[in-house]
Amino acid sequence: MESQLLDESRQRKQARRVPNKKRKGTSKPAKKGKGRSPSAKKSVVTLSEHVVEIISDSGEGAQRCGQSFGSIAARMGNGIWTVEIIPAEIRPPARSVAGASGNRIRVASGPVDNGGDEADLVVAFNEQVLLGRVRAKELKPGCTILMENMWRTDPDAGVAKSYAKAYEELTSAGYDVHEIPMEVECLKYVPDARRGKNMFALGMLCSIYSLDLQMARDQIAFVFAKKGAKVIEPNQELLDAGHAWAEANLSFKYEIPAEKAEVPQIVVNGNIALALGVLASGMEVCAMYPITPATSASHYLSSIFEKVGCVVHQAEDEIAACTFAIGSSYAGKCSVTITSGPGLSLKQEAIGFAVMAEIPMVVVDVQRGGPSTGQPTKVEQGDLLPACFGGHGDAPKVVMAPSSIQDCFYSMITARKIAETFHMVVVVLTDASLATSQQPFPRPQFNENWVAPPVDQSAVSENAMPYDWDARIGVAPRFTPGQPQGMHCLTGLAHDPSSHVAYDPEINEEGIRHRSQKLAAFQKTLKTPKVFGDEEGDLLVIGWGSTRGAIEEAVTRVRAEGGKVGSLHLSFLQPMAPGIKEILSRFTQVMTVENTWCDSLEEELVDESNRRYAGLALLLRARYLVDIDCWGEVKGQPIKPGSIARVIREKLK
Amino acid sequence: MTMSAPATNCLMKLMDNQQTLEDYKSDISPRWCTGCGNNAILAAMQKLCRTEQLPQEKTVFVSGIGCSSRFPHYMNTYGFHGIHGRALPIAEGVKMRRPDLNVFVTTGDGDCCSIGAAHWIHAIRYNMDMTVILHDNLVYGLTKMQASPTSPRGLKTNTSPTGAYLEPLNPLTATLGVSNVSFVAQGVDWVPELLYDLISEAFHHKGFSFVRVLQRCPEFMPDTFDPWLQDAEKTLLLTHKEGIQISPSLSKVYKNQELHDPSDLNRAREIASVLDPIPVGVLYRNGSVPCYDDIRRSETPYTPEVVGTALNEEFDKFTIWPAQ
């Protein structure tokens, strides 16, 4: 978010971190045990980072286990990035390949800004959900697997057989498989192991990664605080049991020394950051309709917004949500509507109206896989062009995209300010990856300037006109109901400066010109984004939104191998900041990396005359007349740094 | 010294500080056809504003798209000529944080009962404090004669050349069937006296006050209401001390009357379901239905300090270092 509008109000100090232990490279455990020989003298292997997954059937608590594991590591000062693994259905069939539910946690010594590559260690409650992850190529070769073994002796011969078969498949594929009697061990403490196995697993992970057990107990007390001691105590007992079992039975143990941050840190996911940002921005109305993956932002906002006298209105549909926001913006402070792809499509007519009538509004699109219902729980960046050009007619609006969890928070403050300063619609594009990922970032220091000023109710000067557009910057005054002498009829019809319906051929053009001018004027407030990595060289990678961390990590890796590569991340997609063309000219090749489809020139029928480019590539090519290539993925997963590094290396050949 | 007529008016206005009918008329003259029922509704509405002395700046007319949705352009108040079908959610947004505003919605039969039907049902349920006039001329006018949901079966239109295929939707029974319905009335453009009374009753009711006005479209439906205009017996006046009072002169013409208690929902539904005679009056009124805008209104004064405190409380919950 490089808008100067917010410079004075932002404290985006990057966490300065001090290593408290010497950093060591990732290393494999020295020995791999079968997990059944008690080892009193385990050697602790020091790692710089690990990617850990815990997966189960939906409802077995793997997500809670993973989130807790991430929180404990973060409390110990580790950098973390968590990624939710969510099946599309509320209750997919038990033990199904597509039903994996859980969490992936990247734990590192220092800060991390993406989910990393494939998993180093996986805890699975059954073999089927694990096979789903294997087939999705989410496990590193030789990955350590801790697998519930109760299925081996299942009374259903089919289940026992499929477990045995999976075990063979996994071991022969070279994975380091440990069969764990989680069910049997848990039944020693609770009558129903389904409720609590996740805490046993958490205990094991605390042992494996040398996490502070007391901190883990505290985390359980925090998570179950509302449920009281009768739930907290057995869960703590299971945690201790898992820890003790791993200490006694597993032959490996790791440590990821934390480089503690110097400034206070908070951990939230992108949707919670977004909701906190709405509160901090001074917007008072959020109108929404339930849609995945946007809704959790409104859930959380509902829990905090009423306390300060504000409203989350669940409308009867997406169009009503958008028009309700428009109505409340018109009569008061700028409002926000939060949605995901299909909702953005439905709101387009209303967004165009707000552009035409110059009503400020913030529209958040937490992107998911599309088109149509697509992949509701999965990430994609397919809404860039619809956000810029989705409605009918020429409807200029600002489109911006946060690229980290922290950005999700500040983007709401920036968006509200832009919307109210320029009487414009601001579309904020996040996505399912940012929405559900957690990452620590410096605790924001509240600034009263973030909050919108009270609604102007003073009398309008006589003969003032509601659309008396400024000839240079295109901005008109804004008369709000309650302002004496400001009466006018706002309309979506072409109108003159008095807001009278325009029948004159000149007036329509004048209105369109002024609405367009506002974007140009706003663009002048933007700063040129900084290049990451090499300032000039063989390849510039350009991205937007949630891919930032992965792109920069890939650039870092390739530069370490000697590649002359840099990256540029755009926070504002419409308008684009000044100075980009000059940056492009410093690199021999330019390409975008986007979590969206683009045709490959390797396809038999695809050539330059019919290739479909990714959204940002298309925008950049049109604007800068540079032959920009693109690469993307639509696997429903965040793009991994390793995948991008491979693409970069290929491109540099 | 002589004064021009407008100057005299202005002086008089200053002296008694009274708003006149002219004060509620915008500087644009209506572009409706001669004989269009919208004119009668506009006159009644301007009279209401004058009678109630509504401050122009505190009054908002919201509409959708259609002939009748041009209405806000002709009022010297704040106006919001919105999107086809979406007048109601826009008006809800306007009202949500602004209890001080008088909110009116003018919407046509296509706008309300077809493209905006989902919003209509939910607006009844929200029961927000606003006055809603359904300008029902039984046809699409602005787009030139297509069947609307309330068109009589058999009406020949440009999209139903052999006659409208379906029985019309009844906006009164539909409204009376929704939870939280709190005020339903019906008027006709050819009895302006009652039209004014009904709009006034609607304005004074706190909640979602729904007035369906049957109105003539001289362009596309010139004869539709002729039988009713020619035979006063085909109009049923609903009278009650809780409804509208009928003047003696009107009673002489419209003798077909029924004493109807507007608190009787079942009887209201029965009356509403009869298409001939046309009932005119307050069908239903219930002042005790809670309003969504009241339910959602907070007593908490909104200040930057309140926001800052709330934010910091939340940040405390999410702070992982230093330990809280």
Image (cartoon, coloured by chain):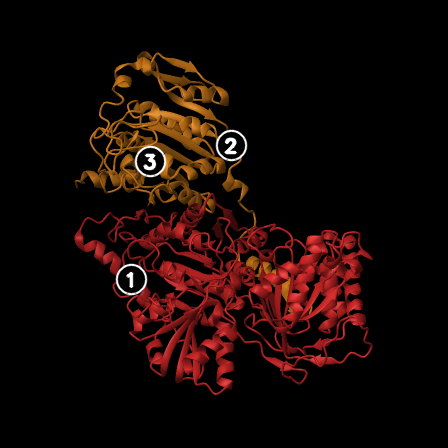
Chain colours: A red, B orange
Cα separation, mark 1 vs mark 3, equals 33 Å
Disc 1 packing (10 Å; few <14; some 14–19; many ≥20): some
Do tag 3 and tag 2 residues touch (Cβ < 8 Å)? Answer: no
Q: Mark 3: few, some, or many residues within 10 Å (few <14, many ≥20)?
A: many
As rendered, which of B281 and A433 lies closer to the eye?
A433
**Residue A337 shows in this picture:** yes
* Residue identifier under label 2: B179
Residue A443, x across and y down, in percent: 59, 69
Query: Which of the image's four quarters has the C terminus of chain A?
Result: bottom left
- Could you say whether the residue bearing mark 2 is in a helix, strand or loop? loop
Please state which of the two labelled residues, at mark 1 or mark 3, is closer to the viewer.
Answer: 3
Q: CA distance from mark 3 to mark 2?
A: 23 Å
Q: Residue at x 30, y 31 (%)?
A: B41
Quadrant that contains the N terminus of chain A: bottom left
In the image, residue B206 lies at what x, y percent? 47, 34
Residue A626, by quadrant, is: bottom left
Residue at mark 3:
B110
Checking the image for residue A605, the label placed there is none
Residue A125 appears in the figure: no
Q: Closer to the N terminus: mark 3 or mark 2?
A: 3
In the figure, is residue B300 to the left or right of A66? Answer: left
Depth check: A624 or B323 in front?
A624
Vertical side of A195 occupied by A585: above or below: below
The residue wearing badge 1 is: A516
Q: Would you say A111 lies left or right of A345 here?
A: right
